[in-house]
Image (cartoon, grey):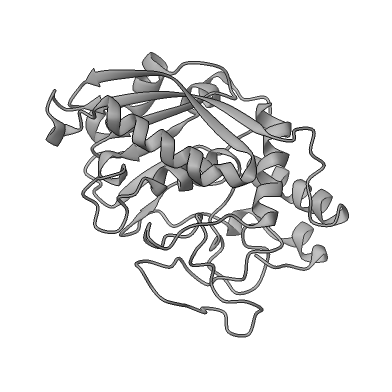
Amino acid sequence: MLFKLFAVAALSVAAYGMPSSSPVGCRSEPTAEFLELTKRMALDEKENGGLSKRASSSIHVDVFFHVIAASNYAQDGYLSTQQINDQVNVMNQRFAPYNIQFTLRGTDWTVNSNWAYGYNNYAMQSSLRKGDYKTLNLYTMQTVYPQDTETTGFCNLPVQNPSQSAFISDGCFLTTRTMPGGNSPLQHLGLTAVHEIGHWFGLLHTFTGNSCTGSGDYVDDTPAQASATYGCVQSRDSCPNQPGSDPIHNYMDYTCDDLRNEFTRGQVARIYSFWDSCRA
């Protein structure tokens, strides 16, 4: 969100929790530690003309896909190898303009009716997680939380020097209906994964704070946004007294997959800042 530099340090960390539920949305919520790190990065980028002081010129991410199904049948979440490959292809296509590449290193299938519906996520991750902290683990499930048909995914935000529990819980959860060719009416092109991976890279929702004032997502070139945007709207301006219209084409909003097609220059700078600081 567009913001003045002096406002960054003055904002309360407690004011920036994410919405807990939405018709189409996620539950990736920032901790106080994450927000403090984000504010420092925002200040550094501001001093550097809106750019991160990149140690990396490109990002390469190894990926492990974990398919969690209630049975061996497709209707219960048992995805095919082709569906996994299609999702990784979407990720590579959408991140390629920003010199970010993903390589699928392995896929495993687990039939567990509890895990498939969001029960005991930490136990599941403890059993299945692979790689180091710069390795992306993706988990596909029927629901990511028990009895929650609204949340389409979530991903834990990066931290410096993760604890053992933070390391195990690192990764992104996706509902199978959002995969390419899925049956979600508005999100079936695989862009929920792009949105969640944006969180894994350190990005917040463009509507963080649900306010037309303040720092929002702490990115200097995303317009102010009073609330999330849902559906396939043609345009929206929830903060008419602030510069710019709502970023309905941004991957970090909640619009339909047909609309979302970009990260801003500032968001890309933030991705690289977090990569160098937390994952590289």
- Given the current orientation, which residue lies at the most extreme bottom position? 241
Counting from the top left corner in percent of width and height, residue 187 is at 32, 53
Residue 267 in the figure: left or right of residue 207: right
Residue 273 in the figure: left or right of residue 151: right
Where does the N terminus fall, quadrant-wise? bottom right
Counting from the top left corner in percent of width and height, residue 117 is at 23, 34
The residue positioned 47% from the left and 78% from the top of the image is 236
Give the quadrant of residue 247: bottom right
Where does the C terminus fall, quadrant-wise? top right
Residue 155, visible in the rendered structure: no
The residue positioned 20% from the left and 28% from the top of the image is 78
Question: Which residue is nearer to you in this view: 253 or 10?
Answer: 253
Give the quadrant of residue 173: top left
Counting from the top left corner in percent of width and height, residue 178 is at 30, 46
Q: Is residue 250 above or below residue 120?
A: below
Counting from the top left corner in percent of width and height, residue 250 is at 52, 60
